[in-house]
Amino acid sequence: MRDNESKVQRKHELPLEGDSTGVFLKVMISIAVFIFALTLAGVLSINSMLQNWNNSILGSFTVQIIPSTESNHAKAVAETIENQNKTIEFLKKHEAVDVVTPLNDAQLQKLIKPWLGDGVDLAKLPIPRLIDVKLKPDAELNYRKLAEQLAEVSPAASLDNHKLWLNKLIHFADGLKMVAMTILILVLLVNSGAIFYSTQTSLGLHKYIIEILHLMGAKDTYIAQQYARRTGWIGLIGGVIGIVLAIPAIFLLGNLASEIEGGIISEANLSVMAWGIIFSLPLFAGAVAMLTAYYTVKRTLEKMI
Amino acid sequence: MTETKDNICPIIEMHNVGIRYGQGPEILSDIKLCLKKGSFHFLTGRSGAGKTSLLSLMYLAQKPSRGVMGVFGKNINFANRDSLSLLRRKIGVVFQDFRLLEHMSAFDNVALPLRICGMNDKEVKKRVTELLAWVELDKSMYAKASTLSGGEKQRIAIARAVINRPELLLADEPTGNVDNDIAPKLMKLFVELNKLGTTVVIATHSEKLITDFMYPRLHLQNRSLRVYPPAKVFGLGGGNER
Ligand SMILES: Nc1ncnc2c1ncn2[C@@H]1O[C@H](COP(=O)(O)OP(=O)(O)O)[C@@H](O)[C@H]1O
Ligand SMILES: [Mg+2]
């Protein structure tokens, strides 16, 4: 009795399980998800890295006025002050700048104290003057351009080196991100294409059965659902395989990166949300496979009588 | 005799219909036809006369290449894909070449029209098991269609055509391969369905069938269709005229 029961179980008319395109799609999708996971991990770590860098670079920066080397002391001081004033004037007019505060003697003294000790008369020493600049909230600033402009205003004015360097790094990372995004889009397109063509091939292969289903009154969606269900499974399974392969690879790359001196890359930790996104890739692959198959069937069948 | 003006034609209606394949010549021209609800017709004509082609218009496998056709009161020329599908669900067809799903069991083949309509598994099982027993196929219920004999396949095809109690039943030489002892039983099935209101068209070569059952005849000859009442053709007279 139970035997009969199981034989009566709902079967699908299209023998898609035996399709050779299934194996091809599974391999294809698992490779795609592998690449996708690695690239995504890369993008997400670059993002977290950029965030850390941006936090340290955003908000404020310091401009340094190198003291004049004029031998006449009074003249040197006057020149330095003039350089400082010119710089302040320029900075105040800059659209990204909110507040410009030149550090006064007391503040400078406090900064220098650890090196020179108490009671140093700043006026007599050729120490650089510092200008603290606060940016407007959300202001975007191109530090390289600013550095060039500053040099024009006064050759004595210069930007904090570290920030300039970070700024370049951020540009580089942004570029990397663009490349990675392009890879993600290409992988997605190639895969959807593969699903599209293998689904079309399969439809051709099963034309006889599809005709019978149509003649019995099946709508296109009835057939599309069978394809969507099967291709969705393939996407999910292929996705799981891809992820299982990608996780060790991500850890390996992470370890290699953390061995780099300077701790720049160690700022690139993957957040819980990032891991969540990576682990949900098989679901994403399943959904993409399912939708692609569904719409391929609908579109292809619409051209039949 | 063929048509009267005040007849309504709710099942099949054809006006100046022509059929051609590709760019070839018309194999049927200027077909005028009206099938009333509850009618029963034989469709005759030599091999190659176009019986299968005419039936394929009726089961909506193709649209006429010319003329106007209505099915269940709906103009086919303007029907979209989904509404054609819904119309097909009210039509049962026994194909000349059966068109079974060979990789599936007799049960699954007969269950197909019900499943397409979204019927639940329990009801499907009840109905299919009952009908398969009636066509004496209960023993091969779970055998793959590809392993069955021609006669058994034909009975599956017939069971599949009638399982959903269609409003229109079209059969293309349905008794050709069936063993002689079951042929009358299958005809009786068609007759019973017809009494319940199903409109029936059976294409056949069998003189015996045509003389045993006194139904009017659609005859295809020289690309055109003529309708004969049973008594006039065979001169048998009597009160069998419908
Ligand atoms: N799919 C097709 N493509 C081209 N010609 C066809 C096709 N089907 C049938 N024909 C032609 O149409 C004519 C009628 O065929 P058919 O309708 O099968 O006749 P019957 O069923 O009465 O034997 C034949 O000459 C046949 O060759
Ligand atoms: Mg034929």
Image (cartoon, helix red, strand yellow):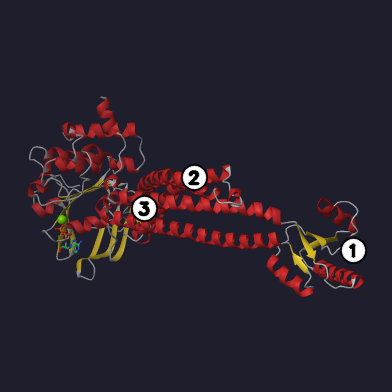
Q: Nearer the viewer, mark 2 or mark 1?
A: 1
Label 2 in the same subunit as label 1: yes
Label 2 marks a residue whose chain is A
Residues A181 and A266: in front is A266
Relative side of B176 to A40, left or right: left
Q: Amino acid at mark 1?
A: Lys
Q: Amino acid at mark 2?
A: Phe
Q: Give the residue number, with chain letter if any, for mark 1.
A: A124
Q: Which mark is residue A28?
A: 3
Label 3 marks a residue whose chain is A
**Of the residues under marks 2 and 1, which one precedes in the sequence?**
1
Residue A170: give x, y in percent of width and height.
62, 60
Q: Nearer the viewer, mark 3 or mark 2?
A: 2
Q: Give the residue number, with chain letter if any, for mark 2.
A: A251
Label 1 marks a residue whose chain is A
Residue B153: give x, y in percent of width and height.
16, 42
Residue A80: give x, y in percent of width and height.
86, 69
Cα separation, mark 2 vs mark 1, equals 57 Å
Q: Amino acid at mark 3?
A: Met
